[in-house]
Image (cartoon, rainbow, N blue to C red):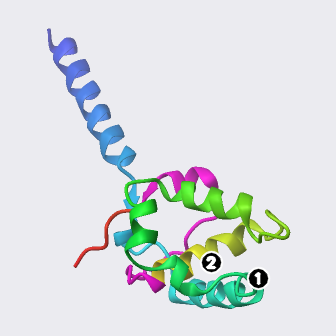
Amino acid sequence: MKSIIFATALWAAALVSVTVSGQGKSVNDGVYTPAQATRGEAGFEASCTACHDTSRFIGKDFLSTWTGKSLHVLFDHVHTTMPEDNPGSLKPQQYADILAFFLKLNGYPEGKDELPSKIDDLKAIKFDNKLK
């Protein structure tokens, strides 16, 4: 009987651990650094401003498109479609830096760790509404 109780407790603890770790992070958790956003701004100016103004990446329309999705969806979209004249030509880290710049433009908090450029890591970050 003790072994059944122990096994059940162990299973429950594992389930809680998976549930908590599966929740991932939110863009409200400070998922980029100030230095990364600065690099992203420079990358945006170098690769994007010929076709885009920053106003396209801030505000209600931009946020409503991506809110509720994993951050990898935005990363994948930008990576596979931009720059328009040569999609996918930037390094993954450059795309992550530009996304960090977008987060900063929208007032999301900075953090201690840089926004990752690996899809699996970005899948664990949810693009949530900005906290007030």
Image x and y of residue 85, in percent: 84, 70
Amino acid type, residue under disc 2 in the picture? Ile
| 33 with respect to 132 (left or right) | right
Secondary structure state at the residue bearing disc 1: helix
- In which image quadrant can residue 10 be found? top left
Image x and y of residue 40, in percent: 63, 83
How far, Cα to Cα, is label 2 from label 1? 10 Å
**Quick one: 15 or 72, which is closer to the camera?**
72
**Quick one: 62 or 37, which is closer to the camera?**
62
At 25% from the left edge and 19% from the top edge, which residue is drawn? 7
At 34% from the left edge and 71% from the top edge, which residue is drawn? 28
| 34 with respect to 78 (left or right) | left
- In which image quadrant can residue 130 be found? bottom left
**Quick one: 125 or 131, which is closer to the camera?**
131
The quarter in which the C terminus is drawn is bottom left
Query: Which mark identifies residue 98?
Result: 2
Amino acid type, residue under disc 1 in the picture? Ser
Residue farthest to the top? 1
- Magenta stretch: give its range: 105-126
Image x and y of residue 65, in percent: 45, 61
| Whether label 2 touches label 1, CB < 8 Å | yes
Dot 2 surroundings within 10 Å: few (below 14), some, or many (20 or more)?
A: many
Image x and y of residue 70, in percent: 47, 54
Residue 11 lies, with reference to residue 112, above or below; the image says above
Q: Main secondary structure of the magenta part?
A: loop
Query: Residue 41 colored magenta?
Result: no
Residue hosting label 1: 47
The quarter in which the N terminus is drawn is top left
Dot 1 surroundings within 10 Å: few (below 14), some, or many (20 or more)?
A: some
